[in-house]
Image (cartoon, helix red, strand yellow):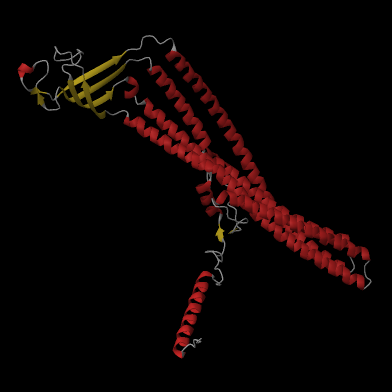
């Protein structure tokens, strides 16, 4: 029995095959398993966008459903006005018919005497014009114009209401941020007071009760800091809902709380409200629309007149000239021609429907007049109330700012006196609390003035 001994050349071939197999497996494994570090999504490191109040209003107008719905209604009303105006002019239409009649084997026109043959073709161009008094008086166009004006006024009402809401949330976030910063400063001051009390206690200059009092104040300020942070985050969420269609909290706002516009004189505000108030404009257009409804209801008692001019062919063949089935002996005759139909409709009796509709329109007219009067009175009351609110808030800002300065000076002096042993810990903590309250009250006062201005601008427009 012989044993097979591999040749050196065969060994080299086998080694090459083994190395090639290992290389293929390694390449496939490298392609299957990716050890690269995943990259961050686009925009992950971008800085948050900074928004002014104007930017916030522009974003909110793009996403507010009530404003978009009111805008859509205004566009629809505009199309109604175009349709009403187009109805004044003649309309042109084409009409194509084929009348197939069953024959009777004896008469050329078949079984139905209204046709002059078993095959009738109608190819008409019809011009229709309504000459009724209601159409000629253009009342429908005026009614559609008034409806469009009402819809546009509602758009402005919705826009101003949205502006007031965005302004409220915008400056509420600013005030919340300021209160959060005040809470941070208050916590630093409380910690500083605690350190002073501990140092004085070690020097046997104050009792341990001062340290306890300072520790309680520090704990209270830590809780206040957490609450102010929660309020700030909630205010940010409220504003983000109004601004972004895809909910986004990554934004910052410009602090222009101290740059509030001045309050115009009352006479100027009254003039602006009389000219630019959308609620008043909508009420006036509603009265106008109700009057036009009464006119349209009265026109229903008048006769209506319509004219139809037809040009084309009505023949037994689809041709300009052909022989008629009833008179074939005449040979081909012209088919192309015209005829005019004038229809006069005189209303006589409808069981009181038209009169009932007229009474309905008259009742709506009286209701619209009452609403207009109430709207005018409400406008005067709200204008005076909003103006007085803004004026009072504006007058209190200087007092609140002065209170902050006084409270800051009081805290500085109380701290120095406490360190010198001339004041108690109660005086120091009271001074710290007074400063916190003064700063928060100043922020609330600025917010009150901004909100009063935004409410006033819902009546007067931007000033």
**Which residue: 89% across, 62% down?**
212
Q: 414 and 283: which one is in front?
A: 283
Q: Position of residue 390 (x, y in %)?
A: 63, 45
**Left or right: 269, with 87 as reference point:** right
Q: Is residue 354 visible to the viewer in this orientation of the structure?
A: yes
Residue, far bottom: 8
**Which residue: 82% across, 60% down?**
219
Q: Which image quadrant is residue 351 in?
A: top left
**Left or right: 174, with 226 as reference point:** left
Residue, far front: 1
Q: Position of residue 413 (x, y in %)?
A: 81, 65
* 330 vs 442: above or below: above
Q: 150 and 31: which one is in front?
A: 31
**Which residue: 23% across, 25% down?**
97
Q: Position of residue 259 (x, y in %)?
A: 60, 56
* 243 vs 312: above or below: below
Tally the numbered discs. Answer: 0
* 68 vs 178: above or below: above
Q: 258 and 333: which one is in front?
A: 333
**Left or right: 183, with 36 as reference point:** right
Q: Which image quadrant is residue 377 in?
A: top right
Q: 408 and 343: which one is in front?
A: 343
Q: Is residue 269 visible to the viewer in this orientation of the structure?
A: no
**Which residue: 49% across, 81% down?**
18
Q: Position of residue 203 (x, y in %)?
A: 92, 73
């Amino acid at each position: 029995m012989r044993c097979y001994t591999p040749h050196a050349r065969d060994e080299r071939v086998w080694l090459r095959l083994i190395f090639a197999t290992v290389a293929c497996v390694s390449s496939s494994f490298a392609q299957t398993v990716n050890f690269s570090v995943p990259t961050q999504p686009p925009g992950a490191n971008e800085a948050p966008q900074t928004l002014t109040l104007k930017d916030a209003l522009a974003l909110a107008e793009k996403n507010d459903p009530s404003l978009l719905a009111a805008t859509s209604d205004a566009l629809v009303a505009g199309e109604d006005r175009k349709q009403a105006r187009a109805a004044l002019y003649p309309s042109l239409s084409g009409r194509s018919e084929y009348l197939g009649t069953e024959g009777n084997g004896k008469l050329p026109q078949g079984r139905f005497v209204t046709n002059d043959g078993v095959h009738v073709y109608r190819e008409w161009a019809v011009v229709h014009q309504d000459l009724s008094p209601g159409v000629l008086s253009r009342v429908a166009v005026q009614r559609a114009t008034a409806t469009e004006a009402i819809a546009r006024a509602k758009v402005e009402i919705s826009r101003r209401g949205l502006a007031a809401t965005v302004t409220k949330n915008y400056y509420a976030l600013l005030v919340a941020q300021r209160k959060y910063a005040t809470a941070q400063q208050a916590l630093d001051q409380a910690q500083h007071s605690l350190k002073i009390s501990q140092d004085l206690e070690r020097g046997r200059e104050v009792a341990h009760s001062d340290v306890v009092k300072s520790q309680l104040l520090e704990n209270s300020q830590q809780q206040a800091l957490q609450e102010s942070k929660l309020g700030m985050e909630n205010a940010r969420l409220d504003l983000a809902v109004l601004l972004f269609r895809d909910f986004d909290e990554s934004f910052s706002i410009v602090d222009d709380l101290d740059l509030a516009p001045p309050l115009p004189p009352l006479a100027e505000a009254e003039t602006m409200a009389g000219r630019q108030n959308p609620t008043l404009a909508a009420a006036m257009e509603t009265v106008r629309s109700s009057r036009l409804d009464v006119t349209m209801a009265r026109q229903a008692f008048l006769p209506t007149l319509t004219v139809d001019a037809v040009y084309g062919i009505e023949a037994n063949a689809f041709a300009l000239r052909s022989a008629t089935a009833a008179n074939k002996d005449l040979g081909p005759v012209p088919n192309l021609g015209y005829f005019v139909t004038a229809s006069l409709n005189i209303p006589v009796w409808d069981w009181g429907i038209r009169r009932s509709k007229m009474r309905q329109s008259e009742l709506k007219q009286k209701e619209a007049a009452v609403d207009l009067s109430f709207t005018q009175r409400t406008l005067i009351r709200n204008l005076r109330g909003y103006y007085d609110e803004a004026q009072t808030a504006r007058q209190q800002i200087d007092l609140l700012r002065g209170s902050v300065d006084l409270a800051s000076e009081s805290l500085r002096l109380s701290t120095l006196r406490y360190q010198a042993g001339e004041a108690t810990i109660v005086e120091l903590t009271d001074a710290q609390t007074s400063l916190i309250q003064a700063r928060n009250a100043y922020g609330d006062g600025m917010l009150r003035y901004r909100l009063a201005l935004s409410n006033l601008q819902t009546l007067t427009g931007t000033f």
